[in-house]
Amino acid sequence: MRTRLAANLTGLRERIARAATAAGRDPKDIELLAVTKTAPPELAAMLFELGEKDLGENRLPTFDEKLAHFAERGLVGAAGPTWHFIGHIQRNKARRVVERSAVIHSIDSARLYDSVARHAGELDLRPGLYLQLKLAPEDAKGGLDADEFEQLALRAAEASRAGGPRLLGLMGMAPLCPGA
């Protein structure tokens, strides 16, 4: 399993480098986020040991499993991965996400941002945040509409400059395109 995973990672990194070069970009400027949401903890640990320092999760129960596995192996803090939370966050679980994540990719409402910012302040943490912009009118995809996004982005940028959570940018999920 480890040999196949290493070969797949090498192939992926080569494809990323070729695509970056073709686009006139430095491949070193491209960051890979290994999303381990359905992978067992052992596989996530293998990815980390093979050099993938950024790991993404989308559900707290599986996130907690992986954190426990990494802790058992001494792979926490500076010795462990940078954890990203990429899933929808219920406000009542925001504190747990802030405690576990260096980067949160799914701030989809002003109320969630306020909750995350409050918990980050209480915990003296500065997670990186991506505001989620709603790109299509699909019920299955959340996010801020354009007006909400603009208002929250200005407020979050100001809070970031003042020592609050670090505003890293925006994210969006592409609309479903049948047959694409």
Image (tube, rainbow, N blue to C red):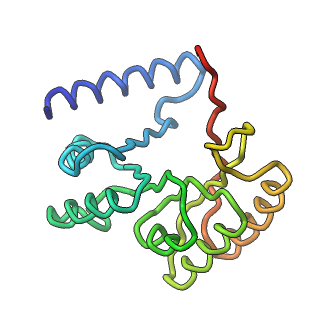
Q: 166 above or below 84?
A: below
Q: 120 above or below 52?
A: below
Outermost residue toward the right in this view: 147
Residue shown at the point (43%, 42%) measured from the top left: 33
Say left or right for 166 vs 38: right
Q: Position of residue 163 (x, y in %)?
A: 64, 75
Residue shown at the point (54%, 55%) measured from the top left: 88
Say left or right for 127 vs 153: left
Outermost residue toward the front in this view: 139
Say left or right for 41 vs 124: left
Q: Position of residue 97 (x, y in %)?
A: 46, 67
Where residue 108 sits, quadrant-wise, is: bottom right
Give 175 or 69, whichever is nearer the viewer: 175
Residue shown at the point (14%, 34%) measured from the top left: 2
Q: Position of residue 59 (x, y in %)?
A: 41, 56
Quadrant including the N terminus: top left
Quadrant including the C terminus: top right
Outermost residue toward the bottom in this view: 122
Where residue 99 sits, quadrant-wise, is: bottom left
Give the mark count. 0
Residue shown at the point (69%, 51%) measured from the top left: 143
Say left or right for 7 vs 81: left
Q: Position of residue 154 (x, y in %)?
A: 80, 62
